[in-house]
Image (tube, helix red, strand yellow):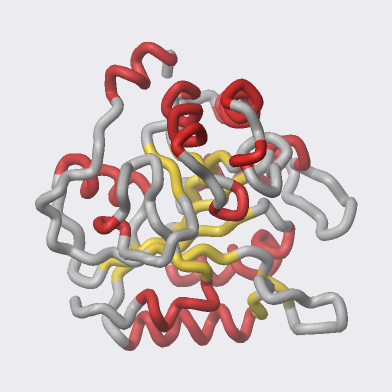
Amino acid sequence: MSLVLSLLLFREIRHDLRTRTPILTFHDVIDRRGPDSVWFDCTTQEFVGILDTLGKRGFRYISLDQLYRHLVDGQSLPPKAIVVTFADNYRGFYDHALPILRKRHIPAAMFVHTGFVGSPVGRPKMTWAQLKELDREGLVTVASQTVTHPADLRNLSFTQQLKEMAYSKRDLERQFGHPVPYLAYPNGKFDATSMKAAQKAGYLMAFSEELAPAERSPSILAVSRYVHTKWRQAISGKF
């Protein structure tokens, strides 16, 4: 998709939506906790437990494309719709979460910082081959999380932010051969400059980590998500 076409297609969130769609964001999924585990880790057992609870309470999983069409066009969603996303392209997703998602036919999204694809340093990242596998299969929407995952985009100039976003988008689209219209701000940190850069780079929807339902987001370029440790809060609203 060309930049000009992306800008022409840009749409904002409708203000008449009465639904409350929570979006969860997970990070690494691990087999079990150990001395190196951190707050954002989710064990396989914990992940299954969350999905089991959501299923028992009648939640229905939707994709980012379904969410986008709902937010900008008002297209209807199934009752108690929910979105599952993942950040940081960890290999743990491929090893531990993906088999569960496949077995349960749950759509999800993975946000990737393209400068570290395939890196074995620290926590291993998924490779381009694995990301292409996800993209071809279609169950997981692969989207952008900039090139280098800056700790706080707000500390960068507009030009620097634009490069982070545009180059990541370019690399993903070259690998997959189709438009990549969605972005997540690293660590959920962003400002008005970030939103302008995201629109300039050609994204149609971008995500923060503000704790609110998607429909209560201030902009389609600042769609709220709950970190997975807040999943109970995310589903506690009236549906």
Q: Is residue 225 visible?
A: yes
Left or right: where 6 falls relative to 159? left
Residue 117 in the image: above or below residue 125: above
Query: Residue 102, how many percent across, how many down?
Result: 51, 64
Look at 77% across and 41% down and name the residue there.
116
Q: Quadrant of residue 107?
A: bottom left
Of residues 92 and 230, the one drawn nearer to the viewer in this rendering: 230
Q: Locate residue 222 relative to residue 163 in the image: left or right.
A: left
Quarter holding the C terminus? bottom left
**Does 14 appear above or below 193?**
below
Place residue 216 in its image quadrant.
bottom left
Q: Position of residue 62 (x, y in %)?
A: 33, 59
**Left or right of residue 17: residue 80:** right
Q: Position of residue 185 (x, y in %)?
A: 55, 45
How many marks on residues?
0
Between 204 and 142, the residue placed more toward the observer is 204
Q: Quadrant of the N terminus?
A: top left
Q: Image point 44% across, 37% down: which residue?
A: 192
Residue 172 visible in image: no
- Of all residues, the one furthest to the left in this rendering is 16
Nearest the eye: 34 or 51? 34
Above or below, 5 relative to 57? above
- Residue 179's spot in the image, x, y percent? 46, 27
Seen at 18% across and 70% down, the residue is: 79
At x 43% / y 14%, what residue is drawn? 2
